[in-house]
Amino acid sequence: MDKRLYPISEEFFNDKINPLIVGSYSQAGRPPRITNYQVFCSALYVLRTGSSWRDLPKNYGYWHSVYLRFKKSSDRGLWWTVLQELQGIKPSQLIWGWMHYCPVKNPINSTVQSLPLPNLHNPV
């Protein structure tokens, strides 16, 4: 499995994140073709690369199905719950790690740069 496309292990996902996701869905309807692990990793891919949903790699599944699953769960507030749970595991490092990899456009000279990581060991 490619670490760039699946940055967390499936064991960690099944232990910490999947119970939160499964608890927020109803079991009505047919079983999904795309796993919760694929949806979660595809959301991380879109956040990390800044690409559009239409540009998802094929191994995540059909982009529109992945987007709809992400959108519906986002409307219910699921991803904030997942973020809070993960922050309990590694306090305040996760959100800064995500921000560090998000490109930011510099309005002065129109270049793209990464945000600097704060010193988390010595809080001010």
Image: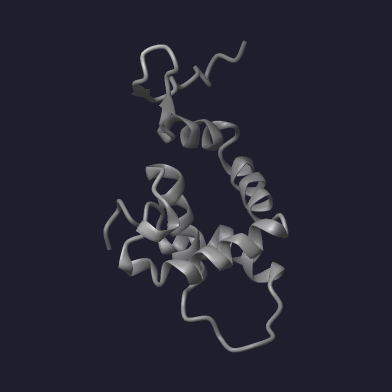
Which colour scheme appears in the figure?
one colour
Please, is residue 93 above or below residue 52 in the view?
above
Q: Residue 54: x percent and y percent?
A: 40, 60
Residue 30 shown left or right of residue 112 in the figure: right
Q: Closest to the observer: 6 or 64?
A: 64
Q: How many numbered marks, from 0 up?
A: 0
Residue reaching furthest left?
2
Residue placed at 37% from the left, 59% from the top? 56
Q: Please indicate, yes or no, whether residue 118 appears anywhere in the rendered image.
A: yes
Image quarter in which the C terminus is found: top right
* Rendered position, 47 above or below 98: below
Side of 21 relative to 47 (left or right): right
Q: Residue furthest bottom?
A: 30
Q: State the image quarter where residue 62 is shown.
A: bottom left
Q: Does residue 67 sit above or below 116 in this rendering?
A: below
Q: Quadrant of the N terminus?
A: bottom left
Q: Is residue 37 visible?
A: no
Percent x, y of residue 68? 56, 67
Q: Residue at x 34, y 21 (%)?
A: 111
The image shows residue 72 at horizontal and vertical percentages of 65, 64
At x 45%, y 63%, the residue is 11
